[in-house]
Each structure stands twice: as C-alpha cells, then as structure tokens.
Amino acid sequence: MPISRTSYWKNPNIGLFFYTDNEVTLVPEDIHPKLTPAFGALGTEVLEISISGSPLMGIYAAGNTKGILLPDLLYKDEQQIMKRTKKEICYSKSKFNAFGNNIVVNDKGCIASKHYSPDQEKQFSDLFGCETVRMNLAGYTAVGALCCANNKGAVVSSKLSDAEIALVESVLKVPATIGSVNFGSPFLHMGIVANDKGLVVGEGCSGFEIGNIQGALGIE
C-alpha cells in the first residue's frame, strides 16, 4: 500500500523529521524500529542519519531526483552516509539553512524564499536541474512549509491566494490543490512525506485530509 500514517515519538509533524525523493528517504537515527516499515510506502532506500546530531531532516534538507541541498553543518560521518545516495549533494553556507522549510522543489521547478540571493537562486537551479523562482507565499518566507509537491501535483495551504496558487502551478508545472494536515493545520510540509510513488502522513491527519492529499499528489 503506497500510503501509511505514522508519527515520530508521538509527534504527528513527521515532515519536520523525514526527507524523501524518488530514490532515498532520510530518517532519524533514533527512529523506533516499529516505525521503519511505514516508510516502505515510499519505495526508496532508507538511510538513518542526523544533521549535526539533529533529527530534523525535513527542516534542513530539500531535493529532487538530481540533487539534495543541505546546510554546511554535517559531521564527517554524516557526510559519508550522504555519499551512499549517489546524488549530487550541495552543502550550503547560507544562514537561512532550513532548506526544507524555505524551498519547495520537484523535478520540474523550484520555489525558493526571497531570503535567498540571485546567486543562490542560480545555485539551486544548477543543483536541481530546473528553473528556480524566488518568492514569498501568503506573506511567509517559509514557502516550503506551505506546500508539498511531487512530479504529479502539489497540495498547498489555504493561506495562499488564487494568484499565488496559479504561480505555484506555473513554476512547479503541476496542478495544485488546497489542503491541510493533522486536523486543520495549514502548514502542509509538517504532516507530509511524499514522492511520486507513495505517501506517509502524520497520525493526526483525518481520513478526509489523507484522501485529499492522495488525490492532489496522484498517489494510487
């Protein structure tokens, strides 16, 4: 089944702690063994890792099929684990290093916070192999917190205006659907870990929310 529901030590905001793309899923080193099977829904290799000892992979990592962007904080042993992904890894020195919160990216486009400079915009485009557009959404710089996207669709916060939703669709080149997680939270990234093959949601998500997210991301 390409859909599962779980938590991280009883915290339903799993998007803070887990990262996935179509090839690899990064999970905290202290993940409970009983939770690991839930991420089989994503159909990827699963790597246990921390970022400078932190379990917040979903906060710090942003990536797609081509590459993964991480802060320049990883210990040497953590960098060795990342080499196993066989992806291009960029370790950025940006002070705005919560890339999972500040960027939403698929294989077709990238939206990055206005915190980043034009030079960083080009760096992101080179790493991800797609156009990057800098913008804020609904007055928030944490654009990645308000959207979750794969190569089939995107689910976006109700805080976005119609014009902003159209812009998200234009940049990411997928249809977007308004949704929520964990019984009404508009910060989608907090409760979703998804790729093109599967979907993991926080335990707090309602059945309606799960069905809506599943449809938006084209998970069958």
Image: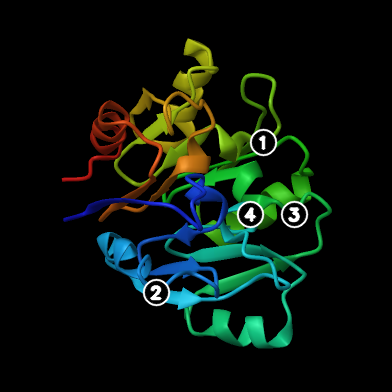
Question: Circle 4 sits on which residue?
Answer: 124
Label 1 amino acid?
Ala
- Up the image or down, 90 lies above or below 81; here it is above
| Left or right: residue 37 compared with residue 220 | right
| Sequence-wise first label, 1 or 2 | 2
| Quarter where residue 77 is shown | bottom right
The reply to whether the C-beta atoms of the residues labelled 3 and 4 are less than 8 Å apart is no
| Mark 3 or mark 4, whichever is nearer to me | 3
Residue 203 screen position, x and y as percent: 38, 44
Residue 100, which numbered label? none
Question: Circle 3 sits on which residue?
Answer: 97
- Up the image or down, 147 lies above or below 13; here it is above
Residue name at image x 47 percent, y 11 percent:
162
| Sequence-wise first label, 3 or 1 | 3
Residue name at image x 15 percent, y 45 percent:
220
| Sequence-wise first label, 2 or 3 | 2
